[in-house]
Image: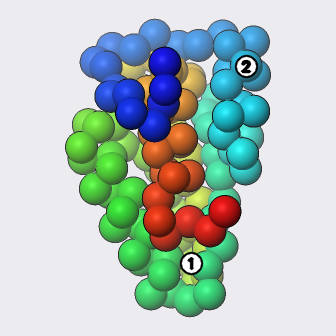
Amino acid sequence: MNPLTAHCQANAPALDDSAVAEWLPQLPGWTHENGGLRARFEFDNFYQVMAFANAVAELAHAQDHHPDMSLSYGMATVRWSTHSAGGKVSLNDVICAAQVSALPEVSP
């Protein structure tokens, strides 16, 4: 399964910690903490932060899977978890994390 081209599925089950650990090498910059996938993105200015946030919102809407986000000048934090999986990581979170990392607003 290629998370860059996959689509989220309703009622995705939680992944166990070992399955999440297997996906993490494909998600550079993402960590598995407090039951979710989390990454921090840095930008030069608030305009870029908002462009990124809007791109994440479009992705989330298209996938019908929505993150928790924190925004400030020059920084955005994104956290994915799946409510229907008890707030734990599901394959949906892996898909969305990979797709966020591939956004053009994100520098490699």
Q: With respect to residue 62, does 18 lie above or below?
A: above
Question: Element under label 2?
Answer: helix
- Residue toward you, 22 or 81: 22
Between marks 1 and 2, how big is the CA–CA gap? 31 Å
* 33 sits left or right of 8 in the view: right
Relative to 52, 106 lies left or right: right
**Residue pictured at 48% horizontal, 81% vertical:** 48
Give the number of the disc on residue 55: none
Seen at 56% across and 24% down, the residue is 89
Q: Residues within 10 Å of mark 2 (few under 14, many from 20)?
A: few
Q: Nearer the viewer, residue 81 or 100?
A: 100
Tell me if I can see residue 32 in this picture. Answer: no
In the image, residue 73 above or below residue 97: below
- Give the SS element for disc 1: strand
Image position of 55 with respect to 60: above or below? below
Q: Position of residue 92 (x, y in %)?
A: 43, 27
Q: Residues within 10 Å of mark 1 (few under 14, many from 20)?
A: few
Task: Give the image location of residue 51, x and y in percent.
Answer: 39, 75
How many tags in the picture?
Answer: 2
Q: Are marks 1 and 2 in contact (CB under 8 Å)?
A: no
Residue 74 point in image, percent of width and height: 61, 82
Please say whether residue 3 is visible from this viewpoint: yes
Residues 86 and 54: in front is 54
Find disc 2 in the rendering and name its residue: 22
Residue 36 image-quadrant placement: top right
- Discs 1/2, front: 2
The residue located at (25%, 47%) in the rendering is: 61
- Give the residue type that dot 2 points to: Glu
Identified by mark 1, the residue type is Ser
Q: Position of residue 12 (x, y in %)?
A: 39, 14
Q: Which residue is mark 1?
A: 72
